Amino acid sequence: MTLDALRRPTRRKPGIRPTRGYRAFQVVNAIVLTGVVVVTLYPFINIVARSMSDQASIISGEVNLLPKGFNVTSYEHVMSDSMFWRNYRNTVYYTFVATSVALILTTTYAYVLSKKHLKGRTFLVAVAVFTMFFNGGLIPNYVLVTSLGLKNSVWAIALPNAISVFNLLVMKAFFESLPTDLEEAAAVDGLSTYGILLRIVLPLSKAIVATMVLFYAVSFWNSWFSAFLYMDRQELFPVTVYLRNLIAGSTGAEFAGAIAETDEAQVDATIKSVTIVLTTLPILTVYPFIQRYFVSGIMLGAVKG
C-alpha cells in the first residue's frame, strides 16, 4: 500500500436508514409499552396510597395516586403485634425450605427426562403430564399428609407442591438445548453423572435456575391454603394466613381491646390495602435482582418441546 493511499481519507459506508414503517412501529411500540407499564403500576400505587389514607377519603373515593389524610394506623397495629412478626419469620423459613426442595427435585427430574436414550423416558414424562390434569382431591391429600405425620410441619407445605410440571417441562427443554459434547467430554475425563450435573450442567444453567427460584419462591410466598389446611396452631401460620384471618375478622377480637373505637373503623377501611402491601413488598424487593435472568431463562427453555 502506497503512502498516498494511506493518506487518502476512507469513505464510510452509509448506515441503513430506518424506513418510515419501522419508525411508525417504534412509536406505536413505545406508546403500547408505556400504556402497559402505567396499567401495571397504577393499581399497586393506588393500593399503597389507600393503605396510608384516612377512612373518610377512602369511602368517598378521593384516593388516587397520593394518600389523602395521611394515616398509618393500620400499619402501626399490624406491625406492633408480635404474632405478625412470628408468622412473617415462618413465611421466610417455609419459602426457603420449600423452594430449595422444589428446585432440587425439579432439576434432577428434568435432567433425567432430558436424556433421550433413557429407557422409560416417555412413561416418566406421561406421569408428570398426567398430574397436570388429575389429582387425588382435597380429602385424599389431607388424609395422606396426616397419615404420614406431616401436619404442623414445613414438609406439609413443601412436599405436596414440590414439583410444578410446567417448570419441569421448561427446565427439561433447557437441558435438551445444551450441547451433548460437553457431557461426553466430561464423562471421558471420569466425571460421574452427578459430577456432570453439578460441575458442567448447572454452571451453564444459571438463567433457568434463577427463573425457577423466582417462580417457586413467589408461589410459596403467596400460598396460604396449604398452611391453613395443615397447620393447627396460630404460631405456625405463615403471614399470608395471619393477614387472611385479619381480613376475615378472625383476629378482630384481639385488636378490639387494643385500639380505640375511632381507630377501629380506620383499620377496617385500610386493612385490605395494608395486607396487599405487606405481602408483596418482599417479592418486589427481590425481583430486580433476578429479573435479568428471567427473560433469557424462559426463552432458552422454550426453544425445544
Image (cartoon, grey):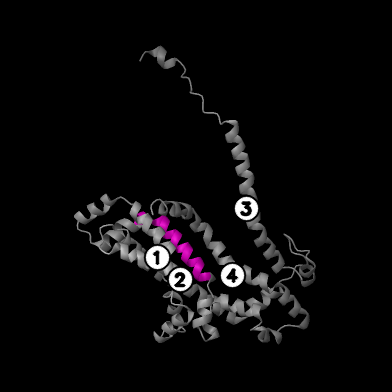
Whole-angstrom CA distance, mark 3 to mark 2, is: 30 Å
> The disc labelled 4 sits on which kind of residue?
Thr
Secondary structure at numbered mark 4:
helix
Residue linked to disc 1:
129
Is any part of residue 39 visible from this angle?
yes
> The disc labelled 1 sits on which kind of residue?
Val
Q: How packed is label 3: few (under 14 Cα within 10 Å), some, or many (20 or more)?
A: few
Residue linked to disc 2:
96
Whole-angstrom CA distance, mark 4 to mark 1, is: 31 Å
Residue closer to the observer: 6 or 199: 199
Whole-angstrom CA distance, mark 3 to mark 1, is: 35 Å
Asked which quadrant contains residue 143, the reply is bottom left
Which label sits in the foreground, 3 or 2? 3
Q: In which quarter of the image is the N terminus?
A: top left
Q: How packed is label 2: few (under 14 Cα within 10 Å), some, or many (20 or more)?
A: some
Query: Residue at left 35%, top 62%?
Result: 110
Residue closer to the observer: 257 or 125: 125
Q: Which of marks 3 and 4 is nearer the N terminus?
A: 3
Q: Which of marks 3 and 1 is nearer the N terminus?
A: 3
